[in-house]
Image (spheres, rainbow, N blue to C red):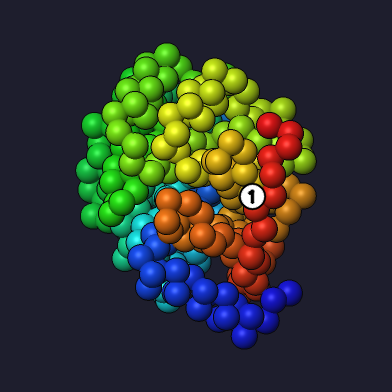
Amino acid sequence: MVNAVAIVSLLDKFDQCCREGGLLIAHVCDCHLLQGKPIDASDPKHQQDHDACPNPDLMPLRLAEVVSELNALRPRPHFVLFGGDMTERGRPIEWDDFFRIAAGLNIPYFLTLGNHDHDEESDWSRSREALCRGLRSAGMCRTPPEAVTDGGLYHSARHGSWRLLVVDSLFDVPLDGVQRDWLARALSSDGTPTILSMHRPFVKVGNAMDRYRMRDPELLRLIIESGCVRVILSGHTHKRRACSHAKITHLVSPTIQDAIDDTPGYRLLCLHDGGVALTANRELAEHAEVAPDALQLDKIEPCDDI
């Protein structure tokens, strides 16, 4: 466990990075908010989800805990990036819960969708309606409702000298052609240092979720050859990793809920001089009713298995 003095010392490093003109981002992934009871008999997976989750009430408590902590952080992040799987199945009430809790953020935030946010058996039209409703009403959300398409969500934004590109990576399939064409145009439009957010990572993390990583060599080649993508932020695996390949830093952040061979948490990163200057994981206790414990600095290793 890292003590409070060590946490303050590391936050001082982030503060110095910000003072030197760095961009501070909080990356929060895999909230998996689950619709509560009563069980919806018309939803074939609702009972299954509840059986697999012994206490779904802890999920919104953990997200609310993280929101409260992010508001209190000093230095305060310039924005929060939600990295996908905010919901368990993209059910409307799950989106309503997410936006209700996220409304407590005093920091601008952006959304990335994960595979659970539009599960293969969910009704995407209902999910899309609830998602767009939430985006329209969310005061601090910087993801526009028009970013939500028939197939998912993708969009771009700028913050200072950085550009954020968000794509929607579904479960165990390559990026769809429409998004690929959009991304290719965006990457070729200018050389602005770029953050790419996609739920599924290209890199392995060393647990069972590696089989579901993004296996799309042509997409990775497109990203590398653009020369402007400096960092790829992902989640999905419920385990962290930080590594570098072809001048791109791949940061896979843990879940704030149930980790797989890891500790729950979220990531803080500071971008400066066109790259990742500092990155650390805020480790959380296993249960939402217990206070957070540690802030762990990441060492960026080579991605020798991509």
- Amino acid residing under circle 1: Ala
154 vs 89, left or right, is left
Q: Is residue 44 in view?
A: no
Q: How many marks?
A: 1
Task: Judge the density around disc 1: few (<14), some (14-19), many (≥20) Cα neighbours within 10 Å.
Answer: many
Q: Quadrant of residue 160?
A: bottom left
Q: Position of residue 43 (x, y in %)?
A: 52, 27
The correct choice, above or below, for 197 with respect to 265 in the image is above
**Which quadrant is home to the N terminus?**
bottom right
Taking depth in this image into account, of 75 and 299 the one nearest to the observer is: 299
Taking depth in this image into account, of 242 and 97 the one nearest to the observer is: 242
Q: Is residue 214 in view?
A: yes
The correct choice, above or below, for 143 with respect to 168 in the image is below
For image coordinates 37% across by 29% down, the residue present is 187
Q: Position of residue 157 (x, y in %)?
A: 29, 42
For image coordinates 52% across by 37% down, the residue present is 199
**Which quadrant is home to the C terminus?**
top right
For image coordinates 60% across by 77% down, the residue present is 7
5 vs 70, left or right, is right
198 vs 241, left or right, is left
Q: Position of residue 221 (x, y in %)?
A: 54, 23
Please name the residue that numbered disc 1 is placed on: 242
Q: Position of residue 24 (x, y in %)?
A: 42, 61
